[in-house]
Amino acid sequence: SAAGGVPQAGRPAGRGEARRTHRSRLRRRDGSAAAAARARQRRRTGTGPGPSRGGGVTEVLAHRSDNLRDKFVEIPCSEDYDSHKRFEGCTPRKCGRGVTDAVITREELIFPSFFCFLFQASILDLHSGALSMGKHFVNLYRYFGDKIQDIFTEEDFALYRDVRQRIQQRIAQVFGISSSAMYLTKPTFFSRMNSTEAKTTHDEYWHPHVDKVTYGSFDYTSLLYLSDYSEDFGGGRFLFMDADSNKTVEPRAGRVSFFTSGSENLHRVEKVQWGTRFAITISFTCDPEYGIGDPLLG
């Protein structure tokens, strides 16, 4: 059965060791072949202007080498929010997109137990327990039952909650709303992207889409990157698809990209050419009916 493919993950020996193991796994390469792949990717996706979908240009909103305190671009809101109930003090009236490297340090980004699973799965949803394994989804919590506490610890979930709270506060600050009016909403998940062939449509991450259309509850979307563009993987940049140009965000570990979820922020992710790209998607709604609590252990 699909459950038979679930990795038998154990607790890492320690945070420092987990950090070193995680980084070494990400950067394990096949010598000259990987170097050649990186060179080809740099030539194809240089940081200067280039062709984009629709015949415009591609501009880099955030280079991997940048260390951004805050970068925000305000854009007109779409009409998507008009077809949903409005919540004063939360529903976007100011729309746009932002990038910051100042919310979370690289050293804090240690999710060792979660990565044990992501090295063999493409999606891990901590709330539902959904773990993608090839063409199937396994419920992690049902599969392991009480033994789940031998794999995850409260420290893992506390770190996740702390990260979520900081991102939520930053979004509220930038958009001028109250963080208490925002609710975590689903799906919220860890993701792994690489150059292997997609097993299901869930793995086809590269299609353009609008979060508010795909998930009606979304009002604000954020992505926390856990690996570095051009070091850990090639391709895999995040593209905002505007009428006149594409605006790209080059991931780096600890970087948070956030934006209003309507059609003003049509986007996609480039196909990963080599290596592995890790990220967490954390999204928020203004409608308490669609709010969910933080995931809990046990």
Image (cartoon, rainbow, N blue to C red):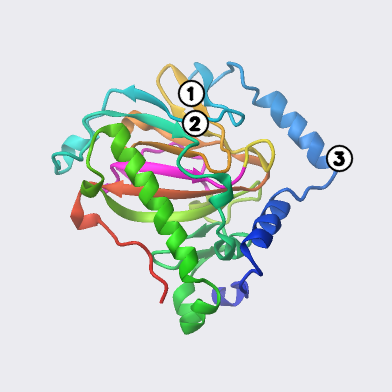
Mark sitting on residue 37: none
Taking 213 as reference, is 256 left or right? Answer: right
Which residue was labeled with disc 2? 239
**Local SS, label 3:** helix
Marks 1 and 2: in contact by CB < 8 Å?
A: yes
Residue farthest right in this picture: 32
Q: Which amino acid, mark 2?
A: Leu
**Residue drawn at the location 72% of the way across and 24% of the way down:** 43
The span picked out in magenta is: 204-227
- Residue position for label 1: 246
Residue 161 at what x, y percent from top left? 40, 58
| SS for callout 1 | strand
Local packing at callout 1 (Cα closer than 10 Å; few below 14, some 14-19, many 20+) is: many
> Which of marks 1 and 2 precedes in the sequence?
2
Q: Where is residue 19 shown, x and y percent of the image?
A: 65, 56
Q: Residues within 10 Å of mark 3 (few under 14, many from 20)?
A: few
Q: Amino acid at mark 3?
A: Ser
Q: Position of residue 176 (x, y in %)?
A: 25, 33
**From this viewpoint, is residue 75 visible?**
yes
Distance Cα–Cα, label 2 vs label 1: 6 Å
Assess whether residue 224 is covered by the magenta stretch.
yes
